[in-house]
Image (cartoon, rainbow, N blue to C red):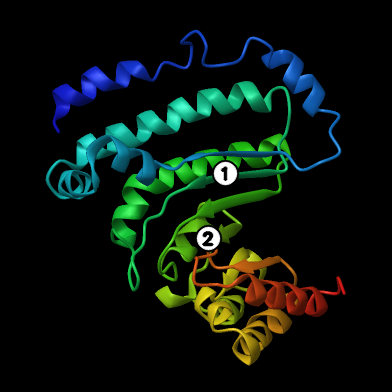
Amino acid sequence: ENRADWDAMKKRFNPDTPGRFPEDFEVRCRQLADRDYVLRIWFNGPFWQLRNWCGFENLCLFMAEDPELVEEMALFWRDFIMTILDRIFARVAPDHFGFSEDMAYKAKSMISPAMARRFLMPCWQTWSAAARRSGCRIIDVDSDGYIGELIPLWIESGINSCQPIEVAAGNDLPAYRKQFGRSMAYHGGIDKRAIAKGGAVIEAELQRVIPPMLVDGGYVPSCDHGVPPDISWADFIHYSRELAKLTGWL
């Protein structure tokens, strides 16, 4: 709630705290260097982490009333994560690198693009550059809600993939592909509401998304977030079969 709280709490984030890395860390890294599967590193982005620390309303108030504190917290998180990543990247390169932000509502980002640029982009840029230097090719971010005004910032920050592309929030994958080209890849984007309606509605939704997205690649089709309980098992099987046909699996 204030700077005193922050000064007390940041002591808990010491990268050298015993137990932060497993005792067999070196062994695990050597084993991963010879893997035949995809290795992913995932963690909290700056907005997600600062919201955990401060609460959403407090964080937004701090951004307006005490921006220097927000910058200090964000840069602290950037450097803490970077210290952890340096130790991993020195030993093994991941295939997929990303972080969670969840920073958008149905129609807008939770904070302005200007605030995202000031408070969050220094983290995004530093981490993305480090991941690329390690040899990682996929730099991913997860955010619910409408992300149309965030994608340009992500691209500028070195991020080249995002998810889950919720249709109900106003996201349109074919439109994003026309707007941003191959600068951004996607995971998700198939309307969960259409899957729940079943039958021809499922097929129409897949036709809306799959053919235009598969032309250029850079797309992993899936339900736009978790599969909700109003999707029946029969409809999910139908969706999966139609998706397999369109993508060449059947």
Residue on which the image places disc 2: 226
Tell me the residue at 55%/82% (across/down).
194
Which three-letter amino acid code belongs to the residue tagged 2?
A: Gly
Residue 152 spot, x, y in % from top left: 48, 65
Question: Residue shown at 28%/58% (left/top)?
Answer: 111
Q: Quadrant of residue 181?
A: bottom right
Q: Considering the numbered disc 1 on the image, is that residue within a helix, a strand or a loop?
A: helix
Work out whether residue 77 or residue 205 is closer to the camera in this orientation and state it: 205
| Residue 209 left/right relative to 153 | right
Q: The C terminus is located in which quarter?
A: bottom right
Category of crowding for the residue at label 1, using alpha-carbon neighbours closer than 10 angstroms: few (below 14), some (14–19), many (at least 20): many
Q: Locate the N terminus by quadrant.
A: top left
Residue linked to disc 1: 128
Compared to residue 105, the image places residue 80 above or below, namely: above
Alpha carbon distance from label 1 to label 2: 26 Å
Which tag is nearer the camera, tag 1 or tag 2? Answer: 2
Q: Nearer the viewer, residue 185 or 158?
A: 185
Determine crowd level at label 2: few under 14, some 14-19, many 20+ residues with C-alpha closer than 10 A. Answer: few
Residue 195 vertical position relative to residue 72 in the rendered view, above or below: below
**Toward the viewer: 128 or 143?**
143
Which comes sooner in the sequence, label 1 or label 2? 1
Say if residue 158 shows up in the picture. no
Left or right: 211 in relation to 98: right
Give the quadrant of residue 36: top right
Q: Residue at x 15, y 41 (%)?
A: 66
Q: Are marks 1 and 2 in contact (CB under 8 Å)?
A: no
Position in image of residue 219 (x %, y %): 69, 67
- Amino acid identity at mark 1: Ser
Residue 158 x, y percent position in the rendering: 57, 52
- Mark yes or no: residue 209 visible: yes
Residue drawn at (24%, 48%) of the image: 56
Residue 60 spot, x, y in % from top left: 20, 50
